[in-house]
Image (cartoon, rainbow, N blue to C red):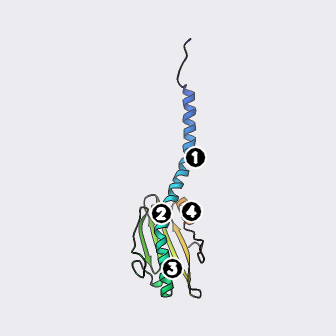
């Protein structure tokens, strides 16, 4: 008796179908993961500026005199996912690049002159709604005085 070895066309088509279904599920999840990782890099780039603006505002009685490269605020620099970063009158603005292309993040300090503290109002702008939603989630601060408002 001759035994056939190998796969039949039906078996191969079933395997191709299973791989296609798994790819359709896995690829968007992986892209979301990459977006969140890039946003984490953007957040890590911004945090030293946020802290420096808070210290500058406490020393100078408000954030309006806080600029990049002055009063202990580092000079503006980018990163792998941040093409531009600026600090003007305490407002921190970041522009994304690579997988964050088209994303603009603005962190607006809200000065409380009675307590001498700052809360932050964030604004994430992008034509990609998934990127904008992930940005809103990533740039959320839970420390005392932080604000979760949207501009």
Q: Position of residue 95 (x, y in %)?
A: 44, 67
Left or right placement of residue 144 versus residue 39 in this view? right
Placement of the C terminus among the 4 image quadrants: bottom right
N-terminal label among 4 and 3: 3
Q: Find numbered disc 3 in the image and state the secondary structure of the residue it sits on.
A: helix
Q: Position of residue 23 (x, y in %)?
A: 54, 43
N-terminal label among 1 and 2: 1
- Residue beneath disc 1: 25
Left or right placement of residue 143 versus residue 89 in this view? right
Q: Find numbered disc 2 in the image and state the secondary structure of the residue it sits on.
A: helix
Name the residue at 57% across, 28% down.
10
- Disc 4, disc 3: CB below 8 Å? no
- Residue beneath disc 2: 41
N-terminal label among 4 and 2: 2
Name the residue at 56% across, 34% down.
15
Q: CA distance from mark 2 to mark 3?
A: 21 Å
- Disc 1, disc 3: CB below 8 Å? no
- Disc 1, disc 4: CB below 8 Å? no
Q: Which mark is residue 133?
A: 4
- Residue beneath disc 3: 54
N-terminal label among 1 and 3: 1
Q: Find numbered disc 4 in the image and state the secondary structure of the residue it sits on.
A: helix
Nearer the observer, disc 1 or disc 2? 2
- Disc 2, disc 3: CB below 8 Å? no
Is 17 located above or below residue 111 in the figure? above
Name the residue at 56% across, 82% down.
117
Number of residues whose C-alpha sits closer than 10 Å to that of mark 2, classed few (under 14), some (14–19) or many (20 or more): some
């Amino acid at each position: 008796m001759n035994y056939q070895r190998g796969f039949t066309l039906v078996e191969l088509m079933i395997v191709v179908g299973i791989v296609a279904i798994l790819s359709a599920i896995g690829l968007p999840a992986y892209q979301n993961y990459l977006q969140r990782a890039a946003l984490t890099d953007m957040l890590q780039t911004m945090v030293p500026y946020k802290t420096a603006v808070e210290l500058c505002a406490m020393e100078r009685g408000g954030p309006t005199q806080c600029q990049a490269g002055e009063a202990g605020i580092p000079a503006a620099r980018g990163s792998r996912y941040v093409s531009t970063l600026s600090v003007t009158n305490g407002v921190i603005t970041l522009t994304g690049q690579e997988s964050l292309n088209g994303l603009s993040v603005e962190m607006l300090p809200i000065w409380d002159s009675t307590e001498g503290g700052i809360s932050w109002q964030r604004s994430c702008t992008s034509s990609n709604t998934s990127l904008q939603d992930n940005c809103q989630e990533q740039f959320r601060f839970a420390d005392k005085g932080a604000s979760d408002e949207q501009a």
